[in-house]
Amino acid sequence: MRICVYEDHRTADLGPLTLTRPAADLLCGLTSLGEKQARHFAAGEVGYLCRPELADLLRARDPRAAVNDPAWLRAGPTVLVNARWLAPADTTKLPAAPFVGLCDGEVAFAVLDARRLHAVTPATVADCLADWAQALPTGDAGGCLIRYPWELVEHNADQIARDFEATGTPSPGPLPAGFALVGPAERLFIHPSATVEPMVVADTTGGPVWVGPGAVVTAFTRLEGPCAVGAGTHLNGARIRAGTTLGPHCRIGGEVECSIVQGFSNKSHDGFLGHSYVGEWVNLAAGTATADLRFDYRPISVRVGDGIVSTGRTKVGSAIGDHARAGLGVLLDCGSTVGAFATVLPTGTLAPRAVPSFTRYGPAGFAPVEDVDAALAAADIMMRRRGRVLTPALRAVYRAVAGRPAEVARPAVGPALRKTA
């Protein structure tokens, strides 16, 4: 089975997370959307139709992958898969003839023969899919199409449990010395290479607890399932609440509730991260707190692009882009968005709910980051501390974000009534 993962125009609504990565790379559960799609279709080959600025990044990551490659796309029957599709747990039985799978009226995937793929490019895929949805047989694809970052957070707890079951996690071995388990042992997985100190508690009553290879979990940490701790991530006396996925090589302390951290990010100290999605290489200094609930319990609104979206949800934290930084004691309101390479400094009050990419906000207000070279040099230093480098492909992606027309820096959508301690 060949699949080709494509991005549509609504990928922009997943910003700031998708400014610097394909939508298929976003985490939900133990795996990314793209990994779930490949597993769902039992894909032997995976290609991509993506934004031109991300093509070299994907090629550098996997030189074997076909990226925006018309010749590969036309070489045989292929399933085009929407990068935003959160595939259902059950495998789809595909018809032999061309077919379009729909989810809430949008195309989730299209089964196509080689002839129909001749006109498909990143620029034409949307029009082609609209035509096929009218001309070809259609049916319910199942699953859901992710529209906004808070929807990934909302589905995360259920997806951890599904991935835990689908990946065939082996039976638990002997528990570490001094380790306390509350709940069923079969819902606990600790990789043999992980280090778990005494006086750590894992509660699997509500779902599985998964601790990846090379992870370090120090004393007085509590893990409440469903939750996942990525490879090489360090937990320093942390309280990890249900519905949380921590990607690889993070440093996490304090309280984290129902949140996703993509990877390589720091929240080493006390503070609260709730119902939020944090990108890579983010630094949240000591005392940083994200409100996620209005104290009048009304639905939270979020600025998306130039508009305001009512989430219809009472629990929504922050969406924080790659390489963003928050200073000591920064307070982020419900429904906040912090762009890539943005810096938020403490002011003694709530930060604005929309801080654009490559912008600095502090006591003097908003200011653009003028020296992009210096910002990238700092990013390179941070990445090398974790054994990574700022590759030319990734540098080009960051420069593309910095080079976009300046977003209007505005204290969007007014202060929300937030949860109090």
Image (cartoon, helix red, strand yellow):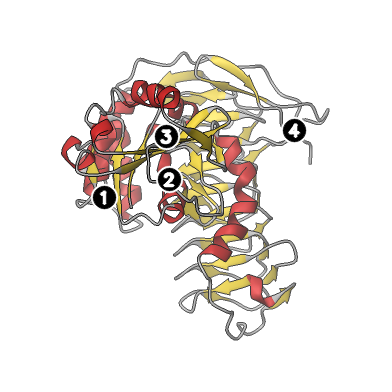
**Residue pointed to by mark 3:** 18
Earlier-in-chain disc, 1 versus 2: 1
The 10 Å Cα crowd at callout 1, few under 14, some 14 to 19, many 20 or more, is few
**Residue pointed to by mark 4:** 314
Earlier-in-chain disc, 3 versus 1: 3
* Residue 342 placement, left or right of 128: right
* Residue 258 placement, left or right of 47: right
Mark 4, mark 2: which one is toward the viewer? 2
How far is the residue under mark 2 from the one under mark 3? Answer: 32 Å
**Marks 4,2: beta carbons within 8 A:** no
Quadrant assignment for the C terminus: top right
Mark 2, mark 3: which one is toward the viewer? 2
Which element carries disc 2, helix, strand or loop? loop
**Residue pointed to by mark 2:** 95
Earlier-in-chain disc, 2 versus 3: 3
**Residue pointed to by mark 1:** 61
- Residue at 52% from the left image edge and 31% from the top image edge: 344
Q: For the residue marked with disc 1, what is the amino acid?
A: Arg
Earlier-in-chain disc, 4 versus 2: 2
Residue 311: horizontal and vertical position, in percent?
66, 27
How far is the residue under mark 3 from the one under mark 4? Answer: 24 Å
Which element carries disc 3, helix, strand or loop? helix
Image quadrant where residue 330 sits: top right
Residue 9: horizontal and vertical position, in percent?
41, 24
Seen as rendered, the residue at the extreme left is: 71
Which element carries disc 1, helix, strand or loop? helix
Asked whether residue 240 is in view, the answer is: yes
Image quadrant where residue 296 sits: top right
